[in-house]
Image (spheres, rainbow, N blue to C red):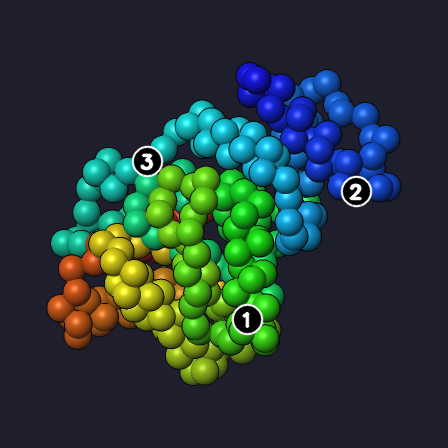
């Protein structure tokens, strides 16, 4: 199958799982097909799925990532020893681990085509990631506490692992507790990465989106926590601060020099 045939196969099979959508027509427009497929990935509850579907999905997603273009650590230039600043799509970054700003349910964003990083990572990693996260949460038996972290395979992403952390939600005034919890997110991810043999990790801007953490203060905490961790532990882990928005790039560039 070519990429179009794979996409249409996946749409049809995922529609067949949803009784109310089984008779839906597949749009002829390529962009509309991509949006529909992503939406079907997003709304699918974790659960068993036929291996034939996963095989086609894996081939399709890896080709889509290749089409977008993969960036490797070797493509980047450190802005300080062991520290990098990169503006781009974290789902196209080939390093040892990328960090996902998750919610407390830990199984991804279920809102179709939502532009949060949780949605993007789950979409391009594939159905397996939500299943793996659901298994972790079932064993845990309670929602993920803020400031901690869990690690999974990255499946169809070009990195090796995804580290999921739940950042603090700021509603109203920023408090010292918010700041300590955000620092804990960064430290927990660094510790978990090194426990799993990672030599590099890419951080997104944890909590600064819909979670409401002020961007500049969040970046200050991120940079300081990483610096402190590397100094205190004599760690050589290479850290990429990944940003998507121009304003975040400017903030990190000023902090890192």
Q: Position of residue 183 (x, y in %)?
A: 36, 73
Quick one: SS at disc 2?
Answer: loop
Q: Position of residue 235 (x, y in %)?
A: 17, 65
Q: Which mark is residue 18?
A: 2
Q: Nearer the viewer, mark 1 or mark 3?
A: 1
Quick one: SS at disc 3?
Answer: strand
77 over 225 or under it: above or below: above
Quarter holding the C terminus is bottom left
Quote the CA–CA distance across marks 2 and 1: 27 Å
User: Marks 1 and 3: CB-CB under 8 Å?
Assistant: no
Instruction: Report the residue marked by disc 3.
Output: 71
200 over 9 or under it: above or below: below
* Few, some or many residues within 10 Å of mark 3 (<14, 14–19, 20+): some
Quarter holding the N terminus is top right
Q: Is residue 150 left or right of residue 188?
A: right
Measuring 41% from the left and 44% from the top, which residue is drawn there?
90
Measuring 60% from the left and 33% from the top, which residue is drawn there?
52
* Few, some or many residues within 10 Å of mark 1 (<14, 14–19, 20+): few
User: Which of the pair 100/172 is nearer the observer?
Assistant: 100
Measuring 49% from the left and 74% from the top, which residue is drawn there?
146
Earlier sequence position, callout 1 versus callout 3: 3
Quote the CA–CA distance across marks 1 and 3: 35 Å
User: Which of the pair 228/150 is nearer the observer?
Assistant: 150
Report whether residue 256 is seen.
Answer: no
Q: Position of residue 194 (x, y in %)?
A: 26, 63
Quote the CA–CA distance across marks 2 and 3: 36 Å
Q: Nearer the viewer, mark 2 or mark 1?
A: 1
134 over 116 or under it: above or below: below
């Amino acid at each position: 199958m070519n990429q179009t045939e794979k996409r249409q196969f996946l749409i049809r099979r995922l529609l067949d799982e949803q009784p109310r959508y089984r008779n839906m027509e597949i749009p002829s427009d390529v962009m509309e097909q991509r949006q529909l497929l992503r939406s079907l990935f997003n709304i699918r509850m974790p659960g068993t799925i036929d291996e034939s579907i996963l095989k086609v999905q894996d081939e399709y997603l890896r080709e889509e990532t290749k089409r977008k273009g993969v960036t490797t650590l070797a493509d980047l230039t450190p802005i300080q020893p062991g520290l990098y600043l990169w503006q781009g799509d974290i789902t196209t970054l080939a390093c040892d681990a990328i960090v996902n700003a998750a919610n407390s349910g830990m199984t991804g964003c279920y809102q179709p085509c939502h532009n949060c990083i949780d949605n993007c990572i789950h979409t391009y990693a594939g159905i397996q990631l939500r299943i793996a996260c659901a298994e972790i949460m079932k064993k845990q038996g309670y929602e993920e506490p803020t400031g901690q972290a869990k690690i999974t395979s990255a499946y169809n992403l070009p990195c090796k692992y995804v580290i999921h952390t739940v950042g603090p939600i700021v509603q109203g005034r920023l408090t010292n507790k918010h700041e300590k919890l955000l620092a804990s997110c960064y430290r927990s991810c660094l510790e978990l990465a090194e426990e799993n043999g990672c030599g590099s990790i890419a951080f997104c801007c944890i909590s600064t989106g819909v979670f409401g953490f002020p961007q500049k203060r969040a970046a200050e905490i991120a940079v300081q926590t990483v610096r402190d961790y590397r100094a205190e532990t004599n760690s050589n882990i290479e850290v990429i601060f990944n940003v998507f928005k121009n304003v975040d790039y400017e903030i990190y560039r000023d902090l890192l020099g």
